[in-house]
Amino acid sequence: MGKLIRTNFDRRELRRDRRYALPAITVTIAEKQYAVLDWSLGGFQPEGLDVQIGQQVTGAVTIAGHDQSYPFTAEAVHRDGQKEGLGFRFVDRSQSLINALDRALVARLMGRRA
């Protein structure tokens, strides 16, 4: 496994990766779509999906404004008391998913579409 690089510098935040609400993404799990409240390169928090902590799900990520979807496997790792939903950590994600999220985020920050 490679070296971890921390991108979130808030000392109160224990997550390694910074969370984003935009650009919006949806996840499709068991043929049902869920809006994502926030996401990072390490995981996501879908709205309304309720599974047990430790359970793995397989699905696809779609980025708003994009036609392509990207497969993933993720594990429910925590329940956030202040928001609805569960926090999921990617267990298996493709490099193409990481690249697509990264491009969409950069495009959003630069004020243009990826």
Image (cartoon, helix red, strand yellow):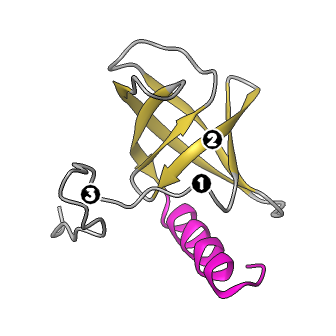
Residue 16, numbered label: 3
Closer to the camera in the image, 70 or 81: 81
Q: Is residue 33 left or right of residue 67?
A: left
Figure quadrant of residue 82? top left
Task: Tell me the residue that label 1 is attached to.
Answer: 21
Task: Tell me the residue that label 2 is attached to.
Answer: 36
Quarter placement of the N terminus: bottom left
Estimate the spatial distance between the alpha carbons at disc 3 and disc 1, rounded to whole Å. Answer: 16 Å
Query: Which amino acid, by three-letter code, is at mark 3?
Result: Arg
Query: Which amino acid, by three-letter code, is at mark 1?
Result: Ala
Given this view, does label 2 or label 1 mark the residue nearer the observer?
1
- Cβ atoms under marks 3 and 1 closer than 8 Å: no
Magenta segment, which residues?
A: 94-114
- Cβ atoms under marks 3 and 2 closer than 8 Å: no
Residue 1, numbered label: none
* Marks 3 and 1, the one that precedes in the sequence: 3
Q: Residue at x 21, y 51 (%)?
A: 12
Secondary element under disc 3, as helix, strand or loop, is loop
* Marks 2 and 1, the one that precedes in the sequence: 1
Q: Residue at x 81, y 63 (%)?
A: 66
